[in-house]
Image (spheres, helix red, strand yellow):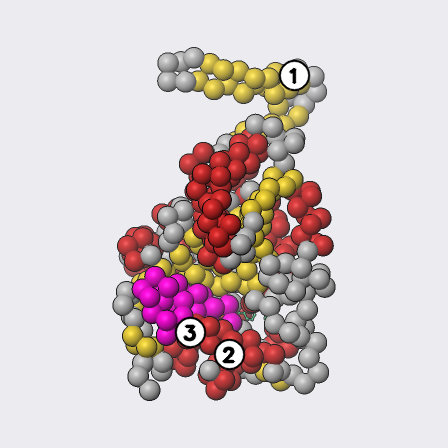
Amino acid sequence: MAKIQMKTPLVEMDGDEMTRIIWQQIKDILLNPYIDLKTEYYDLGLEHRNETNDQVTIDSANATKKYGVAVKCATITPNAARMTEYNLKEMWKSPNGTIRAILDGTVFRTPIIVKGIPPYVRNWTKPISIARHAYGDIYKATEMKVGADCKAELVVTDKNGNETRALIHDFKTAGIIQGVHNLEKSIEGFARSCFNYALDMKMDLWFSSKDTISKTYDHRFKDIFAEIFENEYKEKFEEAGIEYFYTLIDDAVARVIRSEGGFIWACKNYDGDVMSDMVSTAYGSLAMMTSVLVSPDGIYEYEAAHGTVQRHYYNHLKGLPTSTNSVATIFAWTGALRKRGELDGIDELIEFADKLEKACIDTIESGVMTKDLYLISTLENKTQVNTVEFLEAIASRL
Ligand code: NAP
Ligand code: MG
């Protein structure tokens, strides 16, 4: 059989620990036999980031800007323990943070649904994608404690020194204050990423905030979404047969729980932080959650939502068997290959991505699965397999 040919390289960002092991196995067992893989390889493993003073992370993000599609393995975000373990020159920043800052994107997280792993919310038969705005609000806040008999004000000074003031509170007794901000440009980018992704996935888009209480701040988010939708996306949404609607965050929460899923829920930074953990937990397993960073100008970086699965890696190093679920990492590859196929007009590549995803789902639904799913699956005939056996079971179906 002739291998599928690619035109433009994928930006390949290798990573750390157990996911680095799986990364190679996925290529060997599931991809290389069928595709003449064309990638521009960047080693984001912590050792190489340290050697290059993290330049490799910046280079990989710039390459993604150039080619348009990347696939990323999970990477270690260093902490004090990692400084010693890897003898690091510096506590390098989170690669995901660095890449997000360069691509200016929004992260979409979507669960992979399989029979036998029922969500805790029983009517959720379709996936819910959470889109979290990743700039500003309380994540860039300035906070202060305020003593008794103090007046706190907001003061904005323009370039000519003119001040605009607003009273926050006249404190008779002690209290606390917080100053937060956001940028129109960032909110616009967030909105466009969400509209583009909804068109891409052919799913409705919901956006929620608290504009009834926050009449200027949250209201500005609501208005920016509405303006961009009216001017740039309304017709495209009609053609695609999908909807955009805005609702209050508390109404959204109630509707989400009652829904059958099958939509994208765009959230402000804090709401997205909290709701994405709730939604992903309710779908059952972190190992079945995909993640894609979409920039406002349509650049895509695919990855798994989980980390490097350190505990399994240490067992692997000791020669002990591991049962690590590779599905989210495989879906990062299929997402990237499908997108490359769409952009370059390679139908075989799109079909391959569809078939590989189906092979993963069929494998699990036939009862062959890794330990994380084995523990929660409701199937009667189920078998727990190790990391490589699972990939081989997928390969035999593929
Ligand atoms: P983790 O790698 O997501 O793993 C946490 C636990 O979740 C594992 O110990 C395992 O549970 C389970 N798990 C996660 N993925 C699994 C999979 N594919 N198959 C089976 N079980 C899975 O999180 P962590 O251990 O807190 O973090 C490890 C490293 O990953 C850290 O250095 C962190 O910086 C990094 N990280 C990177 C990213 C990223 O690159 N996007 C995201 C998060 C964390 P059991 O041990 O009970 O089997
Ligand atoms: Mg969080």
Mark 1 C-beta closer than 8 Å to ligand 2: no
Distance from Cα at disc 3 to Cα at disc 2: 12 Å
Quarter holding the N terminus is: bottom left
- Give amino acid for label 2: Ala
> What SS does tag 2 mark?
helix
Q: Residues within 10 Å of mark 1 (few under 14, many from 20)?
A: few
Q: Is residue 392 left or right of residue 9?
A: right
Q: Earlier in the sequence, mark 3 or mark 2?
A: 3
Q: Is 341 in the magenta? A: yes
- Pointer 1 with pointer 3, Cβ within 8 A: no
Distance from Cα at disc 1 to Cα at disc 3: 64 Å
For the point 50% across and 18% down, the residue is 155
Q: Is 365 in the magenta? A: no
Residue 170, numbered circle: 1
List the residue tagged with mark 2: 359
Distance from Cα at disc 1 to Cα at disc 2: 64 Å
Q: Where does the image place residue 223, in percent across and percent down from the top left?
A: 53, 34
| In the rendered image, the vertical position of residue 385 relative to residue 292, given as above or below | below
> What SS does tag 3 mark?
helix
- Give amino acid for label 3: Glu
Q: Residues within 10 Å of mark 3 (few under 14, many from 20)?
A: some
Q: Identify the magenta region.
A: 326-350
Q: Where does the image place residue 313, in percent across and percent down from the top left?
A: 49, 72
| In the rendered image, the vertical position of residue 37 relative to residue 149, given as above or below | below
| In the rendered image, the vertical position of residue 79 relative to residue 17, given as above or below | above
Residue 351, numbered circle: 3
